[in-house]
Image (tube, helix red, strand yellow):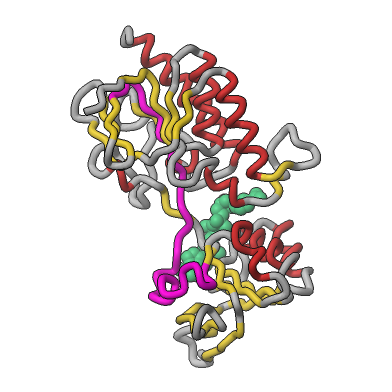
Amino acid sequence: MNNEHVRCLILGSGPAGYTAAIYASRANLNPVLYAGLQPGGQLTTTTEVENFPGYPEGITGPEMMEQLKQQALRFGSDIRTGVATSVDFSEKPYRVTIDDATTLTCDTLIIATGAAAKYLGLADEEKYAGMGVSACATCDGFFYRNRSVAVVGGGDTACEEAIYLAGLAKQVYLIVRKPYLRASQVMQDRVLNNPKITVLFEHNTLGLFGEDGVEGAHLVKRKGEADEELVDIAIDGFFLAIGHKPNTDFLAGQLALDDAGYIATINGSPLTSVAGVFAAGDVADPRYRQAITSAGSGCKAALEAEKYLIDNNL
Ligand code: NDP
């Protein structure tokens, strides 16, 4: 039995978690941060971050996250590996179990566990997992140099991944279910003007095929319309970029969530349905999901945690 008690426990190591750790450690809250499944968070799978203020030349996602981590360490944050697997908010101090093994108690909890990539739900995505199916172009794109790949999605992520892959692969298909892209205009322009990228509007994926890995995809064009058409494309890699699901499964029944599973916060603040439990970053933000907004919410969560500790003489 582990009896460790901390004043401020932080779950997650994206911009929200590390920023909360920087603020909480500078306020002498002695925060303990568990880095979660993907240390550094989603930005570790991004290439250039060009829109974070203060980096006029841009910075890579992994570099930025390493800098945030170093900044949190500099002020004494206790950064550990481990994933929160369950919580118990039924009595104070709150209990959080890490890796189904270690249980800590805490006076305040900042949940910054982020969100994870969504899949289409095709059996073939599992069948070819690690054999041509990926949800991270920057992680796996390297394997597809001079080969053909497809990216599914029409948002900024899909466009960003398609552009990144176009720098490596010989041909990139962008599979878009609508007749238009949802991405910002600048990203749309980059995609549509890239000679290596072919946008397949109004296409859906039915399945994948291949002997020892992905060799192609079965698509349907204008599904359900009179001119519906089955189309096969030859590809070696199939990349998902269709949005994200918040990492809140471990909170089951303990905290109010919205219909999509994001943590419900009070009036856009980090406050949640449980006093002393705060949310920061993508786990509570289906809308903005930017590094800068996540960092800002991590700051707010730490300030709220500090106030809660003072107000409750903890
Ligand atoms: P989005 O939700 O914006 O886009 C998801 C895309 O996937 C949409 O085109 C959607 O289609 C498509 N999609 C969803 N489900 C399916 C499905 N089952 N089959 C086929 N297609 C599907 O997610 P993103 O991850 O692209 O972006 C999230 C947020 O992050 C956005 O606000 C975006 O602007 C931001 N972002 C900003 C970046 C930047 O500024 N550099 C980079 C990356 C993201 P449909 O349009 O039909 O719904």
Could you say which is closer to the camera, residue 301 or residue 171?
171
The quadrant of the picture showing ligand 1 is bottom right
Is residue 106 found inside the magenta-colored segment of the image?
A: yes
Image quadrant containing the C terminus: top left
Q: Is residue 156 left or right of residue 109?
A: right
State whether residue 191 is above or below residue 309: below
Asked if residue 7 lies left or right of residue 210, the reply is: left
Residue 51 locus on image (x, y percent): 70, 42
| Residue 251 locus on image (x, y percent) | 29, 41
Q: Where in the figure is residue 197, as x and y percent of width and height? A: 71, 73
The residue located at (80%, 41%) in the rendering is 57
Residue 113, compared with residue 24, is above or below; it is below
Q: Give the residue at x 44% y 15%.
A: 29
Q: Quadrant of residue 165?
A: bottom right
The answer to whether residue 279 of the structure is visible from this angle is: no
User: What is the span of residues highlighted in magenta in the rendered image?
Assistant: 105-133
Q: Quadrant of the N terminus?
A: top left
Q: Is residue 64 magenta?
A: no
